[in-house]
Amino acid sequence: MKYMSKVKEAVLVIFLVMFALSAFAQTGSVRGRIIDAKTKKPLEFVNVSIRIAGSKTPLTGTVSDSTGIFRINRVKNGSYILTASFIGYRPVEKEFTISAKERNVNVKNLLLEEDSQVIDEIQVVGQRAQMRFEIDKKVFDVESNIAQAGGSASEILENIPSVEVDNEGEISLRGNSSVTIWINGKASGLSADNQAQILEQIPAESIERIEIITNPSARFSPEGTSGIINIILKKDRKAGYYGSLQVGADVLGGYNASASINYSSGKIESYLNVGYRQRKSEGEDYTDRINLDDKGNPVSFLNQRGKNDRKGGSLFTRAGFTLHLTATDHFSVEGFGHFGDRKSNNEIRYKSDVPGSFITSERFSHSDNSSKGGNINLDYKHEFSETSNIVARASWDLWVSDGSSIYKQHSLFANDRETSSWQKQKDDNRSQSWEFQVDYVNQFSKESKLEAGYKGSLGYQKSPVETYSGPTEASATFDELLYNKYTYDRNIQALYATYSTKINNFGVQLGLRGEYTNTETKSLAYGENPDNAIPYKDDYFSLFPSLFLSYSLPGNNEVQVNYTRRISRPRGWQLNPFLNMTDSLNISFGNPYLTPEFSNSFELNYIKNWEKHTLSLSTYYRNTDDVIQRIRYREGDVMKSTSANITQSSSVGAEIVAKNKLLKFLDVTTTLNFYYNELEGFSYQPKGADVPVTGERDDNFSWTGKLIANVMLPYAISFQATGNYNSRQIIAQGHRESSYRIDLGARKSFFNRKVNFSVSVQDILNSRSWHNVTSGNGFRQDSDSWRKGRMARFTLSYNFGNMKASKQKPQRSSEEMNMMEEEF
C-alpha cells in the first residue's frame, strides 16, 4: 500500500498546481442571444462555440437556454471567432476580443436563417459504415450491427473482423488468445478471470464502437501479445436532452429492456443508462478418449456425453457527468455497475472399459452464482493551450462473485456394484484494483508532438473455496483436502514517452515504456497459518520500445511500418496450485511458477482510399518466448491438466480488409486473415508426474474470413447478412477443426426514425461448434462442444428528445421583454 500512498500524494500535488495555474489566468466572458431570423423568436439548445482567430479547433462552447441566451465565462485574453450553429440553419460567425480594457463582451442578437437546401437534402440514402480506418486502429461501429440488436458485448465481438470468441467466452485476436480487453480505454476491472462473464452482461445497446489496436505504441499498456480490444460505451455530446427506450425478446425465453437519457449544455454534460437482460441458453458436448500403452496401442476407452442449460439475469447501469469548470479546466466523474445472477444445470454420462473402473456413470451438477461490481473513474483535464494539456485520472474497481455448486454422481461397476457421491463446493471470489494515471501532451507544431505519462496499477484478488463431500447429502462433511484460500497481489508502475514528427510525406514516432512489476501469490491449505505460508513472488523490470514509420503516397495512398515489444503476464487462475477434483476423472490445477510471455511484433500496413472503396493490407510477424499453454497428461485413469511455459512460437500473416459501396444501396465489408503458426517442440516435467509431458514441433497454415453485407431497401428497411469462417488451426498437443456460421438481421424504421423494429437470426445453419483433437503421453482425445445454436431475437426501440431548436415558446410579459432589452 506504500506505493498507493505515494501515488496519491503525487496526484494531489498535480491537481493543486493545475488549479493554481487556472486561478491566476486573466479571463473574461462573451454573451448574446440567438433569434430565428424569420419568426424573431428565441431559439433554445443552439450550439455556440469559440475558437482562436486563425484556428479551426474549437476551444469551448455552450448552448442557448429557453430564452435563446448564452454565456461563456473565463475566456482568456485574445481574439476569437464565435460560431452559432444548428441542423437546418445556416451557421453564423462573429469576431470578438477579450482584453484588459474589455473583459465582458456582448455580441447581442445573432439571427439564424433556415437553410432550406439542407432540409430538403436530409434523406436516408444509406447507413453509417460499420468499419473505418484510423492511423493506429480499426474502428467498428456497433449501432450499424443489425444482426446483434438486443445482444451482448460478447456477441458483438463475435462478428468483428479478426476477433474470435469460443464456447467458454475466451477471446482471440488474429488467432492469439493473449489479448487485452478495455472499456473506455481502461482495464475497468476486467481480467482474464472475469471478462467472459462481464462481457456477457454488457448490453449491446450500451456500446458505441469497438476499437481494434493490433500493435499499440509505448503510450499504451503492453499487456496482451496480440493487441488491445477497446470497448467504447455510449456517451454522446449533443446539446439538449435526448434518450431512448428499448425492449427485446428471443425464442429461447430471454428478454431485455433498457432506458437511457442524456443532457448536455455548455457547462455540464451528463448521461444515465439502465438495462436489464435475462438470458437462457442450452448446449451439448462430447469427449471420446482412447488410453494408449507405452507403444501407442489402444488399451481402453473413456467416453462422455454432456448436456447443459444456463439462465440468469443482470442489471447493468452507467452514469456520468462532465463539468467545464473554466474554458481550460474540465472535471468528470463516471462509472458503471453490474448486478447479476447465473444458474446452470449440467448432465454428464460416462462409459468406460478401463479395468477396475466403472462401466457407466452419471454425474449431475447444479450451480448458483451471483456477481456484482463496477468501476468509478475521476478525470481532471487542464489545457495549457490549444495544443498542450495534461490529464490526471484515478479509478477504482470492485468485482464480487459468490456461488455454490452441487455435484451428484452414481456409478455402476462390472460386478453390479454401485457407488454414489455427493459434493457441495462454495466459493467467494473478490477482486479490486486501483489505477492512477497522468498523461501530458504538447504539440510543438502541426508536425511534431510529445506525449509522456505515468501509470500505476494496484490489484488484489482472493478466491477461497470450501467443499463438503460424502456418499449422500446427509452424510457429507467438510473436506479438508478440497479447501483452498488463494490470494493474488499485483503492482505495476510504468513511465512512458513518445515523440512524433513529420517531414514532408515522411512520419516517424519513437516511444519507450518502462514497467516494474511485483506479484505475490499465496495458496493456503486447511488449518495452515497464513504467517507460515511461503508466498510465490516475482519481481521484474521490463522495457517496451516502439517505432512507427509512415509515408504518404500520391492518390490517397499511405504506407506504415511499425514495431513494438509486448508482454502477456500469467492469469490469476493459471497460478493457483489448488487441485480441482470435483470431477475425479478430470483434475485441473494451476502453476505458481509461470513466467510472463514476451513477444516482438512487426507490422507493415497499406491503406488506399477511393470515393466509394477502401482497401487495407496488413502483413505482420510475431515471435513469442516462454509461451503459456494448457497441457494434459494421463496418470492411470485420471486426466490431469495444468498450464506451463513450454515452448516458443512464431506467427506470420496477412490481413486484407476491403470496404465497397456497390450500386446505391449495398455496402460490403470483407475481411480475410491468413496466418502461419509454428510451435516448437517441448518436454515438460509436471510436479508429481512419472514421466515428462512432451510435444512435437507443429506448424499450421490457417485463415479466417468475415463478410458483412448491408442493404438499404425502400420504406426505411435495412437488411444485414454476416458470415464467418475459421479454418483448422493448431493448439498445444493438437488442433481445432474448422468452423463457420451465418447471421441475418433486418430493421424497419417508423415515424421519422423515432421507432425502430429489428429482427435477427443468429447461426441460421446451426453450425457453431468447437471441435478439438488432442493427443499426448498415453492418450488420444476427440472433443466437441456447441451451445445456443440457431436463435431468433426481436427488438423494439424508441428515441426521444429535442433534437431540433425549438421555435414555439410561451409569450413573455412586456416587463420580462423590457428587462431582456435592457440587458442586451
Image (cartoon, rainbow, N blue to C red):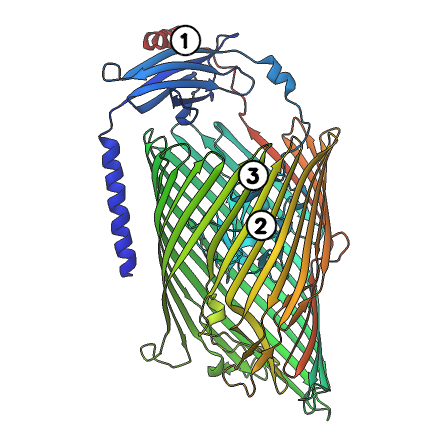
| Label of residue 558 in the image | 3
Q: Amino acid at mark 2?
A: Ala
Give the answer, above or below, for where 309 lies relative to 260. below
Kindly state the secondary structure of the residue where label 3 is placed.
strand
Q: Quadrant of the N terminus?
A: bottom left
Q: Is residue 89 above or below residue 605?
A: above
Residue 532 occupies quadrant: bottom left
Q: Which dot marks residue 153?
A: 2
Residue 576 in sight: yes
Q: Quadrant of the C terminus?
A: top left
Identify which residue is drawn at 71% across, 45% down.
760
Residue ID at (50%, 49%): 562
Cα separation between marks 1 and 3:
62 Å
- Labels 1 and 3: the sequence-earlier one: 3
CA gap, disc 3 to disc 2? 32 Å
Q: Which residue is mark 1?
A: 813
Residue 574 placement, left or right of 117: left
Could you give the CA–CA distance between mark 2 and mark 1, rounded to whole angstroms? 53 Å
Image marks 2 and 1: residues in contact by CB distance under 8 Å = no
Q: Is residue 141 visible?
A: no
The residue positioned farthest toward the bottom in the image shown: 415
Q: How many marks?
A: 3
Going from the N terminus, do you reach mark 3 or mark 2 first? Answer: 2
Disc 1 vs disc 3: which is toward the camera?
3
Picture layout, residue 137 above or below residue 111: below
